[in-house]
Image (tube, rainbow, N blue to C red):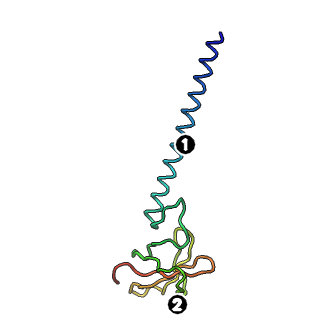
Amino acid sequence: MTVLRRRRSQQRQSTGRAVLCAVLVAGLLLAGLRMLHVHGSSWEWSLSESAAPPMISFRERTYHRADPVGDPYSGPAEQQGTTPGGGVVLAPPPAGEVPTVIGVRDGDRVVTYALSGGP
């Protein structure tokens, strides 16, 4: 009887380990897919978008964050939208032309973004 009990105990342990490994692999896979999604929308390798990511899309155009991040934005301060991470996009009102510089308010700071490509 004791040999049978040991075998059952070993089977339960191996089954538990297999379930634990499957859960860990599934969690890592989901985290990796989330990181790919965030990277595709904002060029950040993280699990969530920041309010002022390295790249944003605004009015169907791509804008890149200026370096250094501390450069103040001095353009029009009218709210025109939000970033996926919750930042407030500051730009001139739509008037037919594409703004070459926009700002994103992230808490107390405003970050400058430049148009990628040309107008």
Residue 24's tag is: 1
Percent of width and height locating residue 113 = 46, 80
* Mark 2 vs mark 1, CA separation in Å: 48 Å
From the viewer's perspective, tell me whether residue 2 is left or right of residue 60. Answer: right
Q: Which quadrant holds the N terminus?
A: top right
Residue extending furthest left?
118
Residue 74's tag is: 2
Using the image, determine if residue 98 lies above or below residue 9: below
Identify the amino acid type marked 1: Leu
Using the image, determine if residue 67 lies above or below residue 8: below
Using the image, determine if residue 20 lies above or below residue 101: above
Residue 85: image quadrant is: bottom right
Using the image, determine if residue 46 lies above or below residue 97: above
Q: Which quadrant holds the C terminus?
A: bottom left
Q: Residue at x 48, y 52 (%)?
A: 32
Tag nearer the camera, 2 or 1: 1
Percent of width and height locating residue 110 = 56, 82
Residue extending furthest top?
1
Q: Which residue is drawn at 33% across and 82% down?
A: 118
Percent of width and height locating residue 109 = 59, 81
Q: Earlier in the sequence, mark 2 or mark 1?
A: 1
Residue 96: image quadrant is: bottom left
Crowding at dot 1, Cα within 10 Å, few <14 / some 14-19 / many 20+, comes out as: few
Identify the amino acid type marked 2: Ser
Report the label total: 2
For the residues labelled 2 and 1, say whether their Cβ atoms are less than 8 Å apart.
Answer: no
The secondary element bearing badge 2 is classed as loop
From the viewer's perspective, tell me whether residue 61 is left or right of residue 88. Answer: left
